[in-house]
Amino acid sequence: MEKRDMIYEGKAKKVFNTDDPELVIVYYKDDATAFNGAKKGVITGKGVINNQMTNRLMAMLEKDGIPTQYVKELSERETLVKKVDIVPLEVIIRNISAGHFASRYGVEEGIAFESPTIEFSYKCDALDDPLLNAYHAIALKLATREEIEEIKKYAFAINEKLKAFWKECGVILVDFKLEFGKLPDGKIILADEISPDTCRLWDEKTREKLDKDRFRRDMGGVEDAYAEIMRRFMAREV
Ligand code: TMP
Ligand code: ASP
């Protein structure tokens, strides 16, 4: 597999073409942003952790019948993935109140829901990723009704699998963001990453934050939290 030109650079990743038109290489950076790029920094070692965690979780989900973009890990920071058209929706599942759910609805963090919630944001930096519902997404032609139904089904199934996985690591999966992509034949598959950048992960006993909120909220101990969550992840994995 030959790596060719960079075709995209995002806030945390770069994407390169390969000699196979159906495959691209993703490179995970240590760069971190929050609040739509308004806050910038570096979390040393994050790229390696996010790459390896994403790949292992996607391989696990794939085995459980969830189609994903993952093909093969090439190095500590680089992975071969299926080329997709990203559906421009951030799909957020929540099990416990935190972050924007808590601030938007005026409730404290840490309230466990009876059933998980789902919400969508329109992936559009210029508009600051506005929240929208399925009707809006269909009106804007971001996805079809059938695609949204498929995405919802996968997202809730992924939640059940990830919740159970993290529980075994002594970690509560509070909430997380997923992105989906479309293959040339129209099939919807899980894309992007699943990492401490895109999940809220709390220690089960102390409720200590082991994710990117430590960076977003200037709490300190960011690298240590990433290392600790990765340590627990790998201990459970093998
Ligand atoms: P929120 O409470 O800020 O809406 O975040 C919900 C979850 O989504 C949380 O686990 C962090 C993740 N997330 C991203 O991965 N990217 C984003 O741009 C935002 C806003 C949240
Ligand atoms: N999407 C945010 C940003 O672009 C990152 C985050 O809060 O996770 O800066």
Image (spheres, helix red, strand yellow):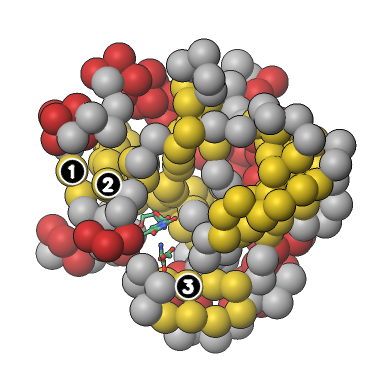
Rendering coords of residue 176 (x, y %)? 44, 48
The CA span between labels 1 and 3 is 23 Å
User: For the residue carrying disc 1, how many other residues have a C-alpha within 10 Å: few (<14), some (14-19), or many (20+)?
Assistant: some
Rendering coords of residue 105 (x, y %)? 13, 58
Vertical comparison of 110 with 158: above or below: below
Q: Quadrant of residue 88?
A: top left
Q: Residue at x 81, y 42 (%)?
A: 73
Q: Are marks 1 and 2 in contact (CB under 8 Å)?
A: yes
Residue named by callout 1: 132
Q: Quadrant of residue 20?
A: top right
Task: Check mark 3 vs ligand 2: CB closer than 8 Å? yes or no.
Answer: yes
Looking at the image, tell me whether mark 3 or mark 2 is earlier in sequence order.
3
On residue 33, the disc is 3
Q: Amino acid at mark 1?
A: Leu
Name the residue nearer the viewer: 128 or 43: 128
Rendering coords of residue 192 (x, y %)? 55, 44
Q: Is residue 112 visible?
A: no
Q: Residue at x 68, y 59 (%)?
A: 28
Horizontal side of residue 1 vs 208, given as left or right: right
Horizontal side of residue 232 vs 213, given as left or right: right
Q: Residue at x 28, y 33 (%)?
A: 142
User: Quick one: SS at disc 3?
Assistant: strand
User: For the residue carrying disc 3, how many other residues have a C-alpha within 10 Å: few (<14), some (14-19), or many (20+)?
Assistant: some
| Quarter holding ligand 2 | bottom left
Q: Is residue 123 visible?
A: yes
The CA span between labels 3 and 2 is 18 Å
Residue named by callout 2: 122
The quadrant of the image that shows the N terminus is top right
Vertical comparison of 35 with 156: above or below: below
